[in-house]
Amino acid sequence: MVLEWTVQVAGSAEPIVALVGDDVILPCTLRPTVSAVYQTVEWQRPDLKPKEVHLYRDEKDNFLLQNPPFRGRTSLFKEELEEGNASLKLTRVELSDAGNYTCYVPLLDHQKTTIQLIVGAASRPVISIEGIKGDEVVLRCEAEGCYPEPVMEWCDVHGRVLPAAGPPETSRDREGCYTVTSHVIVPKTDNNTFTCRVQQPEIKHMKERRVHIPDQMFPTQCQSLWLTVLVAALVGVAAGAGGLYLLIKKGMLTISMEKHAGWRLLTSIQSRLTKRSTTSGSSAFQWQFLISKR
């Protein structure tokens, strides 16, 4: 009895995922195990011209027909060819390497297999304190050099998603990578710890950055109240000064602006605010205002 079997070229049913700059292996094996030393193994990208990514023929590599961007970045595992391993190693992966690769063995009844390579780029987000809004702090998170486009969200210390201050800002560079920026306005809490999370489901990638904000960064209610009073006083003085100017111009009233009650009120408020900020011990929020007298 003569037993016959067909040698198959097997790859990977699942896409292979790699990040820019990584080395990746595209699997290709002969089953049942048959030596590939004397076979011709062609790795191709059908969508490219030329389509040759790596060619092994006559027991050696042949780079004459290789697509230029792959030069110096492809190799086979020569010591494992005897065991039927014809996998391709691709180094220093680039975004343009993404696509479908075919491992083709023509002498084995034209057997071949196709492997999908997905390439992504990712970076860890950076958090900064952008400003103060009332008695809350405005945080900014940025992640640059990302592909595919990431999803950015804010969370509290318990993992609960926080509403962003608005839609994320997105831009792309020449290589097609994304830069995403998001803002959130946070109140003072028991722990003041917040997290910016960046996710890229297509490449199964997630990065996050956590920040703790000291209590001193949050304005106190007194500071917020004094600031409100000061702003109101400034508006009132400005309106009063405008009215006085018109009266003086018409000759109906002559008075020195330095002695106007509004200026004395503003000077008094400024003195109180400065004293209040100094005695509070908070160097982060010492407000200083300069009154220019004419």
Image (tube, helix red, strand yellow):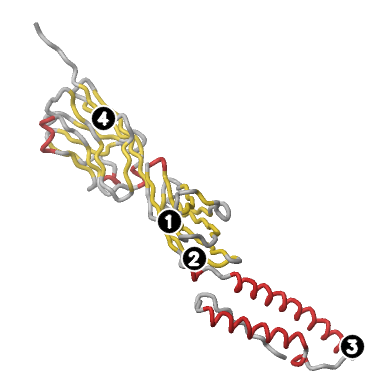
At x 42%, y 47%, the residue is 199
Crowding near pointer 3: few (<14 within 10 Å), some, many (20+)? few
- Of pointers 1 and 4, the one earlier in the residue sequence: 4
What amino acid type should be assigned to the residue bearing mark 3?
Lys
At x 55%, y 51%, the residue is 163
Crowding near pointer 4: few (<14 within 10 Å), some, many (20+)? many
Q: Give the camera-side residue of 6 and 64.
A: 6
Q: CA distance from mark 3 to mark 1?
A: 61 Å
Q: CA distance from mark 3 to mark 4?
A: 93 Å
What amino acid type should be assigned to the residue bearing mark 2?
Ile
Between disc 3 and disc 4, the foreground one is: 3
Q: Which label is found at residue 144?
A: 1
Circle 2 residue: 129
- Of pointers 2 and 1, the one earlier in the residue sequence: 2
Circle 4 residue: 11
- State left or right for residue 203 relative to residue 194: left
Say if mark 3 contacts mark 4, CB within 8 Å.
no
Circle 3 residue: 250
Between disc 3 and disc 2, the foreground one is: 2
Q: CA distance from mark 2 to mark 1?
A: 18 Å
Q: Give the camera-side residue of 189 and 205.
A: 189
What amino acid type should be assigned to the residue bearing mark 4?
Gly
Say if mark 2 contacts mark 1, CB within 8 Å.
no
- Of pointers 3 and 4, the one earlier in the residue sequence: 4
- Of pointers 3 and 1, the one earlier in the residue sequence: 1
Crowding near pointer 2: few (<14 within 10 Å), some, many (20+)? some
What amino acid type should be assigned to the residue bearing mark 1?
Glu
Helix, strand, or loop for circle 1? strand
Between disc 1 and disc 4, the foreground one is: 1
Quarter of the picture holding the C terminus: bottom right
Residue 274: percent from the left, percent from the top? 59, 83
Helix, strand, or loop for circle 2? strand
